[in-house]
Image: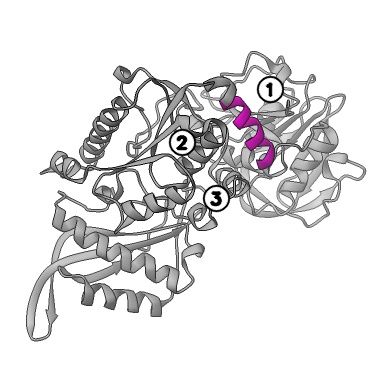
Amino acid sequence: MQHDKVLILDFGSQYTQLIARRVRELNIYSEIHPFNKIPSNLDEYKAVILSGSPFSVRGEEALHPDLSGIRGIKPMLAVCYGAQYLAHFSGGEVAPSSTREYGRANLSFIKGNEPFLAHIHTGSQVWMSHSDTIKRLPDNGVLIASTHDVDNAAYRIDGEETYAIQFHPEVYHSKDGKRLLENFLVDIAGLKQDWTPDSFVEETVEAIKEKVGDGKVVLGLSGGVDSTVAAVLLNKAIGKNLYCIFVNNGLLRKNEFQNVLNQYEGMGLNVKGVDASDRFLDALKGIEDPEKKRKAIGNAFIEVFDDEAHKLEDVDWLAQGTIYPDVIESVSATGGPSATIKSHHNVGGLPDFMKLKIVEPLRAIFKDEVRRVGATLGIDPELLGRHPFPGPGLGIRILGDITAEKVRILQEVDAIFINGLKTWGLYDKVWQAGAMLLPVNSVGVMGDERTYEKCVALRAVESTDGMTADWVNLPYEFLQKTSNDIINKVKGVNRVVYDISSKPPATIEWE
């Protein structure tokens, strides 16, 4: 089945992925491409959206897209930078704003009988995020909406299906943002709303059958949502020709290796569990630097996985749980260098000597869509609701060098924290939670004895995609009980602290 597609041109906005997700919430398929790498076959797309940008259209570094095959030919919505770009380079004027145009605002004027603004009323809250403002509309520009501070908040181009807005409809703060996108995509551009989890499962299973045929596929399972949903999709397509390998790197949560194996067995997956704990701990001996730890864990995994894969005969394919953000983030929107915050365990793949063809059933969808697809496949909601857990596991939650004793301590602490969240009904209100073992000892008193033992930090955040995150205000009573349980039950810990940093500026993990 051929779906109608929306092309989103990325100018480097932090909200670009959010535009794509909002479009997909309307059951319409969307793709993100850098503004300077526009697909050659534009016939595949029924509408185009231009994203915002941290750049200014007035600056020497202004980003210039080639819109010759788009403008006036396809319905186009220009958001923020896109709106300013159309104005600045088409006879209008963009200037630095004299008032602060960031945050919540309300539409004070809406032009009547405009399909783009149908069902949206005066007073509707929108979200602004720009330092420039449009002083004069471009040639043939028609004003269709204003706020108290921004006269040219929205306009259209006469004679074209081109619309432009200075606010961001994709963020939750724009209360009618989804309606606005629906007006543009469905009522104006005429796209069909048929991109659903059910259709994705059906089409992906058929595509896997066609691509893989009778070939054998090997997949490294992690116990997480992405690899699990990928495994179930592949199993639905090729059955016993899928060989899953679940490696215990010795850095999993307490009892997780056996618990996850039992869960997979109940799902009918062909899974082999490999306990390589000692191998990983040996590889990590004496290493303190976070990046070196990640690389040591990654290299050890490749070696173990390769050993096990070679025991299988006639395997042609390697399956990976790559999701759409991994694909997008591998290409810089502005073509410039991007800072490496930390290396990701799932980027870089396996070495060339494995010589396997790649199949990635989830590479077109976002994390929230993966969960919806998982629900359609009938996967246990408890598994789909699992918090994200880093590939290097507790290895990047133990600051400093790693030993078997430190792993034991952190597994016990983590188990008390996570089980406590579940018991108190808090687990599903948190996006990700975990404990960090700090490389410091502190003085304490237990009974009549002075102690000098480890300090642990608890971390719980709320987020939608992990790109930004706020710390969760957990009840004091819960934190008090958890702290007491940890100090009383975990030998080697005498102090518990709670991390109240948000991302940015902090990251979710400590390493």
For discs 1 and 3, the disc positioned in front in the rendered view: 3
Which residue position is annotated with label 3? 379
User: What residue range appears in magenta?
Assistant: 197-208
Q: Earlier along the polypeptide chain: callout 1 or callout 2?
A: 1
Query: Which residue does the image show at 56% across and 48% down from the upper left?
Result: 371
Q: Nearest to the eye among marks 3 and 2: give it.
A: 3
Q: Are marks 1 and 2 in contact (CB under 8 Å)?
A: no
Q: To which residue does mark 2 refer?
A: 321
Residue 14 appears in the figure: yes
Q: 164 or 313: which is nearer to us?
A: 313
Q: Which mark is residue 89?
A: 1
Estimate the x, y position of residue 485 in percent, counting from the top left. Answer: 28, 76
Location of residue 270 (image quadrant): top left
| Quarter of the view holding residue 316 | top left
Disc nearer the start of the sequence (1/3): 1
Q: State how the image is colored.
A: one colour
Amino acid type at image mark 1: Phe
Q: Secondary structure at mark 3?
A: loop
206 left or right, relative to 233 = right
